[in-house]
Image (cartoon, helix red, strand yellow):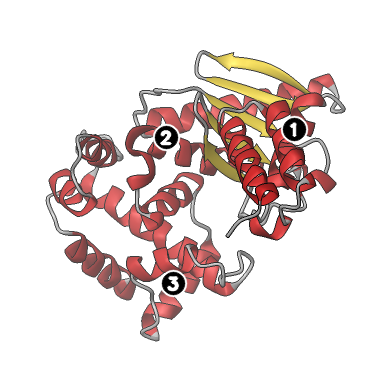
């Protein structure tokens, strides 16, 4: 049995989520404070209060610049104007790369938010930042330390998530979502070596195992398990691109076809076969054989 205070706190929490999802951050923060003041334990909602606070701080201390009809950036005002211009251009080029390579027809605009301080983003445990689909836009939030050389890779990665979800929503399998993002940013030589060694030892994960590991709270994002899962998913997507592109066919046309099939209501495995002409299981076997020969 819930007390009156607990029920009221739950209502405020629901409103906080609703406002956050519509990017109405001031109202989200007010509702969250009301929920917490009524005794709602922060442990019950994980990082939501910190996410709202960090995004609201970025909104208050940032400058929003529109890049195109479907892209805007929210950058800290504390950065020099020249640096903000550089970041705007890098974000635009990375977003255009995703748009062109995946043949995206954006249904909602993308907003890229850079947190104004490293303290504000201590809660971020993702590979780069995080992507979240909001009611009116796709939102990408990045920590300030991403400026140390990885900004373009981060935008490529997270904008790919936005593109896939723009087309097919949350029905995209985790391995496909992360694998396509890793393929877009590019695999490293160390990724390749890791996979060849695991294949030789008979420990190369399947895509189902990759999805389970990436979706598990027990997988630390700085661990070898996570690194292997990201690398395997990215390598598999690259194998598919190489197998189903070329000879005048855009490399990622099959991805566009797959997403369009899913938008029509087709299940992933059937959409995959329609887009590639092969079963998912057969494609995995071919990929594993390719790694063994390399």
- The answer to which quarter of the image holds residue 233 is bottom left
Kindly identify the residue that appears in the image at 39 percent across and 23 percent down.
Answer: 107
Q: Earlier in the sequence, mark 3 or mark 2?
A: 2
User: Which residue is tagged 2?
Assistant: 163
The percent position of residue 37, horizontal first and vertical second, equals 79, 45
Q: Looking at the image, which is closer to me, 60 or 14?
A: 14
CB under 8 Å between discs 1 and 3: no
| Residue 292, above or below 201 | above
Kindly identify the residue that appears in the image at 53 percent across and 58 percent down.
Answer: 188
Residue 152 seen by the camera? no
> Which quadrant, please, contains the C terminus?
bottom left
CA separation, marks 3 and 2? 27 Å
| Residue 126, above or below 256 | below
CA separation, marks 1 and 2? 31 Å
Image mark for residue 9: none
User: Which residue is tagged 3?
Assistant: 195
The percent position of residue 184, horizontal first and vertical second, equals 46, 44
CA separation, marks 1 and 3? 48 Å
Q: Looking at the image, which is closer to me, 227 or 267?
A: 267
Mark 3 crowd level (few <14, some 14–19, many ≥20, 10 Å Cα): many
Image mark for residue 30: 1
Q: Earlier in the sequence, mark 1 or mark 3?
A: 1
Kindly identify the residue that appears in the image at 24 percent across and 43 percent down.
Answer: 245
In terms of secondary structure, where does tag 1 sit? helix
- The answer to which quarter of the image holds residue 170 is top left
223 on left or right of 40: left
Kindly identify the residue that appears in the image at 40 percent across and 28 percent down.
Answer: 100
The percent position of residue 195, horizontal first and vertical second, equals 44, 72
């Amino acid at each position: 049995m819930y007390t009156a205070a607990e029920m009221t706190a739950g209502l405020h929490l629901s409103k906080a989520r609703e406002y956050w999802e519509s990017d109405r951050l001031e109202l989200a923060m007010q509702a969250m404070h009301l929920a917490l003041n009524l005794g709602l334990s922060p442990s019950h909602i994980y990082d939501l209060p910190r996410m709202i606070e960090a995004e609201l701080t970025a909104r208050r201390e940032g400058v929003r610049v529109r890049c195109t009809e479907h892209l805007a950036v929210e950058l800290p005002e504390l950065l020099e104007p020249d640096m903000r211009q550089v970041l705007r251009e890098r974000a635009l080029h990375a977003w255009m790369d995703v748009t062109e390579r995946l043949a995206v027809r954006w249904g909602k605009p993308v907003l890229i938010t850079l947190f104004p301080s490293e303290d504000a983003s201590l809660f971020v445990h993702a590979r780069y930042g995080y992507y979240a689909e909001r009611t009116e836009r796709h939102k990408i939030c990045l920590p300030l330390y991403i400026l140390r050389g990885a900004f373009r890779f981060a935008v490529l990665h997270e904008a790919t998530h936005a593109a896939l979800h723009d087309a097919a929503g949350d029905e995209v399998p985790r391995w496909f979502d992360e694998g396509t993002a890793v393929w877009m940013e590019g695999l490293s030589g160390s990724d390749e070596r890791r996979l060849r060694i695991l294949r030789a030892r008979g420990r190369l994960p399947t895509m189902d195992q990759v999805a389970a590991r990436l979706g598990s709270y027990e997988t630390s994002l700085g661990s070898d398990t996570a690194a292997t899962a990201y690398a395997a998913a990215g390598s598999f997507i690259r194998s598919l691109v190489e197998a189903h592109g070329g000879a005048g066919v855009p490399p990622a046309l099959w991805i566009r076809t797959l997403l369009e099939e899913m938008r029509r209501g087709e299940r992933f495995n059937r959409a995959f076969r329609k887009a590639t002409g092969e079963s998912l299981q057969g494609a995995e076997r071919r990929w594993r054989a390719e790694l063994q020969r390399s």
